[in-house]
Amino acid sequence: MYQIYALKYGERDTTACNFFFRETSHAPLTLHFFVWLILGGPHPVLVDAGCCEEHTAARGLRGFVSPAALVERVGVKADQIPLVVISHLHWDHWAGHTLFPRAEFLVQREEVAFWTGPMARYEAYRMVAEPPTLASLVTLNYAGRMRLVEGEHEVFPGLRAHWVGGHTAGLQIVSVETARGRVVLTSDASHFYRNVERYQPTQLITSLPQMLAGFDTIHRLAGDPSRIVAGHDPEVAERFKPLEPGIIQIA
Ligand SMILES: [Zn+2]
């Protein structure tokens, strides 16, 4: 049985029409930014690396707390995390990898291929990338710190990564056996509960059919909607148990 903590490292405001697929409402929308720490296995596992202070200004991120400081508040030193599962390579999930100097990074092979491939030249994708942090994929790979996987991958028994694609080519979600059943960390396969619950996609996609099928996968893996942890939704703090500012106990 594993324990999971959602660690919130910042916030950003946008509008519904800028975010959801074919949405007409101009209602304000706030995104919360998280990394997720999983304890109870042979060693701690982090899901996503967040970003560093230097990336926040250009992205309009406020209330930044370093993901490294957050994991330490749960009792784990950042340089003692051996494995970070990276859901995808957008700046807010990958650019903080330097905060975890001893970690190996588990990423879908297709995700690395996408962000180092021909789509990089187009603004629609470039806008969510931090090129210097993507260049480090190569040096980390030669340093033996990239675990490139395909499809479904068991990290430990009861802790698995599952390719879903949709939002990005190699987006993966994580399922975790806990005392409350199998919890699904959706990351950006469902930024908000509204995505997975109403099957409303987001605007930023590489494949719409994959995103829709990903909602099915989330429901199938979780079994019960109460075990879904959305990727950027402030409502996570209401559905689960905040322990102190920025730290939410999921299970
Ligand atoms: Zn994101």
Image (cartoon, rainbow, N blue to C red):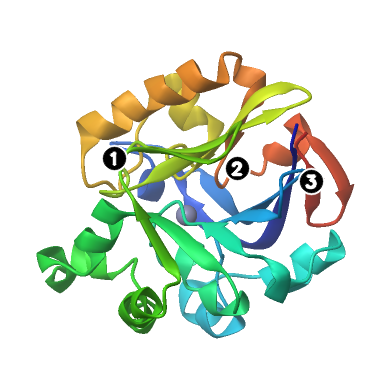
Q: Amino acid at mark 3?
A: Ile
Q: Quadrant of the C terminus?
A: top right
> Is residue 226 something one can see in this rendering?
yes
Q: Secondary structure at mark 1?
A: loop
Residue drawn 21% across the image and 59% down it:
114
Residues packed near mark 1 inside 10 Å, few (<14), some (14 to 19) or many (20 plus): many
Identify which amino acid the numbered label 2 is placed on: Asp
- The front one of 75 and 158 is 158
Q: Which residue is mark 3?
A: 248
For marks 1 and 3, give the CA distance: 27 Å
Q: CA distance from mark 2 to mark 1?
A: 18 Å
Residue 22 position, x and y percent, is: 28, 36
The amino acid type, in three-letter code, at marker 1 is Gly
Asked if the beta carbon under badge 1 is closer than 8 A to the nearest atom of ligand 1, the reply is no
x, y (%) of residue 109? 28, 55
Q: Quadrant of the N terminus?
A: top right
Q: Quadrant of residue 3?
A: top right
Q: Which residue is mark 2?
A: 233
Alpha carbons under labels 3 and 2: distance apart:
12 Å
Say the numbered circle drawn on residue 166.
1
